[in-house]
């Protein structure tokens, strides 16, 4: 596998970042993940716009234009012969003497990128449907920033894994914020799709945005509002979205089956619509 580090393409096992990198010492950095389908990046303008926004919010100058980012990503996809999978990008505040405050503005950001092969179209989990557990949301108050400080999400996902579940839905004040690495949705018994409105409490999912647009285009009723753990347990359906899962049906929550315990019709429809959307645009 070929990775990218600060302007160089090199074998992944030779890719290195110094110990004094602020990404390593402080998780002082931002990342992005975009899907690749048929060798093409999906909805990449949205991912690069979110990268720009996250960097601005923490005061790191974006080291590249969107065009330059896309050239790096496209080059990595080509060098790795990637047909289906993910491109990962990370930018940190660079290498400096250990000190919480920002280093000199002249300190170059560290830029790292690599690809991961992954079955997106033939993902067996989408056939069976995913199981989910609810866990407390232990994160900070700026979850709209795609920061590499992911410890609370690592612990949430591990809690899910130990419960034999695929994903953890995080809970704050009785309401679902989002999945540990995804946006959470339910479908109420009257067929309304519900997802939490954007705020500092959750990441503005790029897949979420596309799914909301598809629901509007195809006349599916959707509300952006808070929903509780109880509503999730009593929902007709649930699903989650992300660049790597696309639209993932949920078939059980906290060990109890949802609906008939199989992927629901709304989630399956949105998954199909999202594939059509992904295959039809750059
Ligand atoms: N929320 C969180 C916490 C995430 O980590 C992710 C995955 N990046 C998402 C939502 C989904 O965002 P996207 O659809 O842009 O992948």
Image (spheres, rainbow, N blue to C red):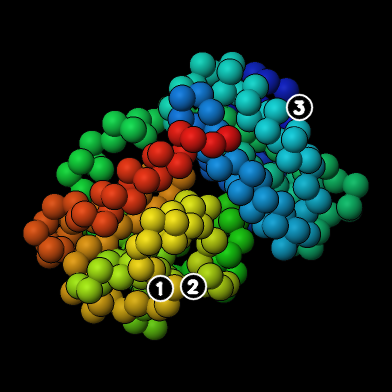
The correct choice, above or below, for 127 with respect to 211 in the image is above
Which structural element holds mark 2?
loop
* Residue assigned mark 1: 223
Camera-side residue of 158 and 116: 116
Q: Nearer the viewer, mark 2 or mark 1?
A: 1
* Residue 23 is at least partly visible in this image: no
Q: Residues within 10 Å of mark 3 (few under 14, many from 20)?
A: few
Residue at horizontal 19%, vertical 52%? Answer: 263
Q: Earlier in the sequence, mark 3 or mark 1?
A: 3
Report the residue that reaches farthest toward the left: 260
- Residue at position x 26%, y 57% in the image: 266
The mark closer to the camera, 3 or 1, is: 1
Q: Position of residue 182 (x, y in %)?
A: 42, 55
Q: Residue 204, located in which quarter of the rendered image?
A: bottom right
Please tell me whether mark 2 or mark 3 is closer to you in this view.
Answer: 2
Residue 134 x, y percent position in the rendering: 28, 67
Q: Is residue 2 left or right of residue 260?
A: right
> What numbered label is drawn on residue 197?
2
Q: Earlier in the sequence, mark 2 or mark 1?
A: 2
Circle 1 SS class: strand
Q: Which residue is mark 3?
A: 7
User: Residue sitting at 37 percent across and 61 percent down?
Assistant: 219
| Image position of 122 (left or right of 10) | left
Residue occupying image coordinates x 42% and y 77% = 225
């Amino acid at each position: 596998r070929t990775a990218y580090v600060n302007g160089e393409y090199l074998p992944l096992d030779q890719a290195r970042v110094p110990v004094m990198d602020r990404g390593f010492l402080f998780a002082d950095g931002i990342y992005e993940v975009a899907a690749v389908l048929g060798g093409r990046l999906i909805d990449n303008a949205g991912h690069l716009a979110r990268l720009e926004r996250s960097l601005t919010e923490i005061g790191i100058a974006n080291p590249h234009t969107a065009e330059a980012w896309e050239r790096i990503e496209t080059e990595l996809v080509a060098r790795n012969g990637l047909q289906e999978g993910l491109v990962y990008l990370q930018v940190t505040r660079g290498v400096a003497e250990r000190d919480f405050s920002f280093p000199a503005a002249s300190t170059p950001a560290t830029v790292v990128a690599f690809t991961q092969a992954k079955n997106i179209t033939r993902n067996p989990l989408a056939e069976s449907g995913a199981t989910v557990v609810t866990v407390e949301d232990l994160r900070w108050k700026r979850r709209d920033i795609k920061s590499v400080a992911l410890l609370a999400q690592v612990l949430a996902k591990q809690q899910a894994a130990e419960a034999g579940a695929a994903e953890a839905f995080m809970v704050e004040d009785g309401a679902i914020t989002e999945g540990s690495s995804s946006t959470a949705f339910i479908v109420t018994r009257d067929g309304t799709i519900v997802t939490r409105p954007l705020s500092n409490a959750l990441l503005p999912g790029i897949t979420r945005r596309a799914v909301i647009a598809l629901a509007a285009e195809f006349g599916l009723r959707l509300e952006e509002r808070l929903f509780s753990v109880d509503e999730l347990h009593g929902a007709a359906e649930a699903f989650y979205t992300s660049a790597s899962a696309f639209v993932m049906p949920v078939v059980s929550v906290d060990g109890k089956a949802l609906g008939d315990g199989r992927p629901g019709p709304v989630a399956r429809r949105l998954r199909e619509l999202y594939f059509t959307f992904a295959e039809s645009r750059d």
